[in-house]
Image (cartoon, rainbow, N blue to C red):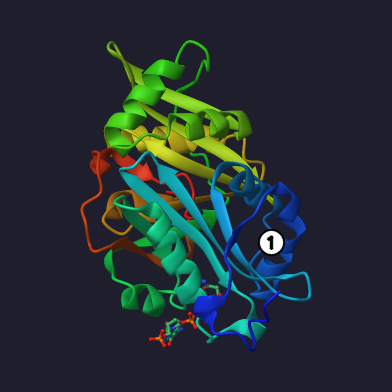
Amino acid sequence: MPDPLTTPAAELPVRRLGPEDLDRCLALSQDRAWAREERKWLFLLENAEVHAIDAPSGELAGTVTLTRYGTAAAGIGMMLVATRYGGRGLGRQLMTHVLDTAGDAAVFLWATELGRPLYEKLGFETLGVTEARVGRLRPGNDPVLSRPADLDGDLDALLALDAEVFGADRAALLARLFAFAEEVRVVEDETGPTGYAVSWRSMNTLFIGPVVAGGEADARALVTDLARNADGLVRLEVERTRPGLLAWLGERGVTQAFSTSFMVHGGRPLPGDRTRMFAPMMLAMG
Ligand SMILES: CC(C)(COP(=O)(O)OP(=O)(O)OC[C@H]1O[C@@H](n2cnc3c(N)ncnc32)[C@H](O)[C@@H]1OP(=O)(O)O)[C@@H](O)C(=O)NCCC(=O)NCCS
C-alpha cells in the first residue's frame, strides 16, 4: 500500500468504505477532535458513498462522503485528513475524486473554516452561513400543532412534498431516515401534509432535520413538538437568512455552537423550493 508520506497525493488510490470500516472512521474523527458520532457514521456508511485513502498502518489517512440525489444534486461531507498527513494534497485528491464521481450534479457542502480555503481553490462558492444551534429547548406553553406521521399512510405525500422542496430524488434515503429516526411529525391543512420534520439521535443529542414547512410558524411547531421528547440537548442547523427562527431558538435556550459556510460548486443554483427548507437533514448529507 502506498505511503501518503512519500507518495504524491494524486497517485494515492481512493476506495469506497463500508459498514465494516466504522471503527476506522471513528478513529479518524477522533484524530481531528471531532465527536465520536457512531450512529451517524454508520448511517453514512450504509446510505452514502464514503470514499477514503488508506494509511499503511491499517488506519485511514482521509475520508469524504458523497450523497447523490439522482443526477440533479449531490452533498459532500465528513472531509477529514489525519493530522499527520495534513498539508500533502490528500484533501484535494479526495475532493477531486468525489467531484469527478458526482458528474453534472449541483454539488453542495457546509464548510468549516479549515475546509473553506481548499473548497474555494476547487471552485466552490459561499452562498450563505449556517448556524449549528444546540441546547435544551424550553417548551413554553405552546399547544401541540403537529401530529406523528403515519409512515404507511403519509409516506407518498411526504415524499412528494420533499421532492418539491428539495428538488432532487431522495425518496430511498428518506425512507431509510424515517426508519433510523426517533420521530417523524407532520403539519397539514385540508389538502394534506404541508410540512414535516424528523428527529434522530446521535450521541446524547436529539438532532432535528430535515424541517420542511410552508412557513416559519409551522417550522417552530414541528421543532417544538419534536423537542418535547428530547430528554436533553437538541441540535439543528439554521441559515442566517432566517433571523426570526434563530431569535426564537435563542429565546428558548438553543444557542449557537458553531457556524459553517454553505458552499455550492460553481455557485450553481440548487433545485427545488428552498424557501420551505428550514433545516437540512444533517450537514454531512444535505
Ligand atoms: C480541511 C482538511 C481536510 C484539508 O486537508 P489537507 O489534506 O490538509 O488539504 P490539502 O493538502 O489537500 O490542501 C489542498 C489545498 O488547499 C489549501 N489548504 C488546505 N487547508 C488550508 C487552510 N486551512 N488554509 C489555507 N489553505 C489551505 C492547501 O494549501 C492546498 O493548496 P494547493 O493544492 O494549491 O497547494 C484538513 O485540514 C482537515 O481534516 N481538517 C480538520 C477537519 C475539517 O475541518 N474538515 C473540513 C470539514 S468541512
63 lies above or below 142: below
Quadrant in which the N terminus is drawn: bottom right
Residue 109 pos. (x, y %): 39, 59
Q: Viewed as shown, does residue 268 lie left or right of 184?
A: left
Q: Viewed as shown, does residue 242 lie left or right of 235?
A: left
- Residue at 66% across, 63% down: 35
- Residue at 68% across, 81% down: 3
SS at circle 1:
helix
Q: Amino acid at mark 1?
A: Cys
- Of 113 and 144, the residue lying toward us: 113
84 lies above or below 176: below
111 lies above or below 286: below
Residue 157 pos. (x, y %): 37, 18
Q: Can residue 272 be seen by looking at this rendering? A: yes
Q: Can residue 259 be seen by looking at this rendering? A: no
- Of 105 and 154, the residue lying toward us: 105
Residue 59 pos. (x, y %): 74, 70
Cβ of mark 1 under 8 A from ligand 1: no
Q: Viewed as shown, does residue 17 lie left or right of 165?
A: right
Q: Residues within 10 Å of mark 1 (few under 14, many from 20)?
A: many
Residue 207 pos. (x, y %): 56, 46
194 lies above or below 30: above
- Of 90 and 32, the residue lying toward us: 90
- Of 219 and 30, the residue lying toward us: 30
Across the whole image, how many numbered discs are drawn on residues?
Answer: 1
- The residue indicated by pointer 1 is 25
- Residue at 64% across, 52% down: 41
Q: Quadrant of residue 120?
A: bottom left
